[in-house]
Image: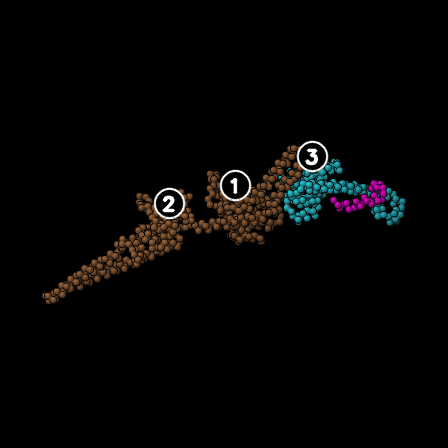
Amino acid sequence: MSQEILRQGIGGRLQKPLKAASHLLELRSEPPKPVTREAERTQPGPSSPKARLRRPAFWSGLAAAVIAFVAAISIFGANNLFVSHLMNTQYSSEVELKFVVILLLFESGIIFAFAVQDRRRRKLEELLRQSEDRLEFAAKSADLGLWSWDAATDTFWATEHCNEILGIPMTTQYSMASMRDTVHPDDRALVEQALRDGVASGKTFEVEYRTNIGQGPTRWVRVRASTVLDEKESLVRISGTIVDTTNHRKIQAEVETQKQSLSHLSRVGMLGELSGALAHELNQPLTAIMSNAQAAQRMIGHRRVDMEELRMAIEDIIANNVRAGEVIRHLRALLKKEDMRQARVDLNDVARDALDLTHSDLIARRVSVSFNASQTPSFVAGDSIQLQQLLLNLIMNAADAISSTAHDGGMLILAVDSTEDDNQHIAVSDTGPGIRADLMKNLFDPFFTTKAHGLGLGLSISRSIAEAHGGTIWAENNAGRGATFHIVLPTLLEAKDEIGERT
Amino acid sequence: MKSESVPDRTPQVFVVDDDHAILRAFSRLLGSAGFSVKTFDSPAEFLVQHDPDVPGCALLDVGMHGMDGLELQAELANVGARRPIVFVTGRDDARTSVRALKAGAMDYLTKPVDGDDLIAAVSSALARDVKARAQRSEIAAIRARYNLLTPREREVMEHVVAGRLNKQIACDLGTVEKTVKVHRARVMAKMQVRTVAALVRLMERLRPGEERL
């Protein structure tokens, strides 16, 4: 669509909105003159007669022409008079000649004044136009569309870029109702609510929604707007900016996917490290099942079968089967690659599960464990697998720290409690060598590691998991030996049992 | 099964594992094979209740909280309990198994262990204990008889066992053949043997037997 046509299309609507736009952005202190830009720009080309009437240059030109016409006639008239006098009566009048010269001087003075004024006006108009151009250029460069809605006329004014973002033609006049149709049906309620709240509060408000225009692709836009009320507190207009956030969202989604993949990879890597421990966790129930089954087999071979003992053996087989199944389920959950799920999670359960998985690894490393569960369940909203990954990371780090110095093992304390401001808190303490002061600030950076075979992703992923749950993670050295890692997560209130999934 | 050989005390299988499921399963399996089983869920508890005079063997888990199986083995050796030990481990770790076997373990089984293998290992450990106990009591009896001998009689006996004749012994010890004959008769009576060959066998058992088991 050519600029020319676009400009003509909005020509009639341009005056007021320009005022609104400059008012909104507060780039100028004085309001601009009611000048139409398009009239200036389209000077060489055809312009509408209506617009021409409104041009001050036109009026000044016309005035000059009329005066010139009168002057010409008077000069002509004077000359005729002068000639007739010379020829017929030999009569000459200096008075008349003087009058004509004065008249001519006066005329040219007026014409000159008009010309100067017109020049000055043109210069001012040019400055104004440049300023407005710069404003729109700046807005467009910032990928910002500007718009305003007039309450009295129920009409929208919008910059070209705004219409481009929304994908609506410049020629169409939009009202609030037709603008509503450009919002994705699923987001209409959201936008309306934001609009209502914004008008009610009188504050600047912001809403991000999907557009719904024809067959075109759905785009995400973020609208920021403020309302203007008159003295009687009734709505005069709403004006604001619009930004296309589709790409931003796409990139965000990509980053999120990458994060998930990385977190999954690190989880798989961690399971590799834990494979010995996991084999042991499976071995225990399998051993119990085998021995119980073979005991039962032998009992049946006896002359007198002890039915009670046999029943207990079978019960134990079932119980151990369940136990083995639980290990497999755990393993599968950790290996699975899936998006973050939101559910009600008790941090005590997460801690217990993580300790179960690392149980035999910790024994092998001579790390004794003390677990202080909270008195009441510590509910948070989140993904239990990711939270477990977070704890497994910290537990294994603690075990690494302990076995890095002491061969006779050490102590790992895991505590779940709540903070004074009612957030949930997990602390993982070890009796290792502690954290060197100069490494403290880089601890959670990606690819930062002090281990010979570490990738340096564990703590960085731990932090992103904590942050994805609206929490924080930090480390400090203990007063005595070792270090403590703290995680604080927002408490899930009982009332908010059901958590909606929003992607 | 083997209870007839030691009539006063039934041999016991002492099972030590910190996993109760394993403890119950092993106890049930060994029970079904006719063994008398005692279970302990911690090495410390086992050590406290341990009576070296009760015949039997120990079935120990390698990886346990607090004290592991190998440490328990060392602790038993420290207090002089020469009980045969069968290890069961959840991790197939060659170094640990070598250490355990070098320290005198009877067997080193890997979980999940086949019931027949477990029963066979426990049976042979029990048999070893019974045999060792019998040997030890026999050697103790020989030693008791030996302790009855006077220094002179022991001197004479050394020469007899070395295969020397009375005349030669008398010459060596600077005495007469008759005296040697009297000493020799007393040695034979006190050691409760009739022939020199039997005496030689007894003395042979006494010497290396002190070191073994």
Q: Please state which amino acid type lies under the numbered disc 3.
A: His
Disc 1 crowd rating (10 Å Cα; few below 14, some 14-19, many 20+) is: some
Question: Taking A198 as reference, is A121 left or right?
Answer: left
Main SS class of the magenta portion in the image: helix
A57 or A349: nearer the viewer:
A57
Residue under the image location 62 percent in, 36 percent down = A315
Q: Name the residue tied to disc 3.
A: A302
Give the image location of residue A481, x and y in percent.
57, 48
B203 in the magenta segment: yes
Residue under the image location 29 percent in, 55 percent down = A47
Q: Chain of mark 3?
A: A
Give the image location of residue A317, x and y in percent.
62, 38
Q: Tell me the distance, in whole angstroms, between the alpha carbons under discs 2 and 1.
A: 43 Å
The colour chain A appears in is: brown
Q: Which residues are magenta?
A: B188-213
**Marks 2/1 same chain:** yes
Q: Name the residue tied to disc 1.
A: A346
Counting residues from the start of the chain, the first of labels 3 and 2 encountered is 2
Disc 2 crowd rating (10 Å Cα; few below 14, some 14-19, many 20+) is: some
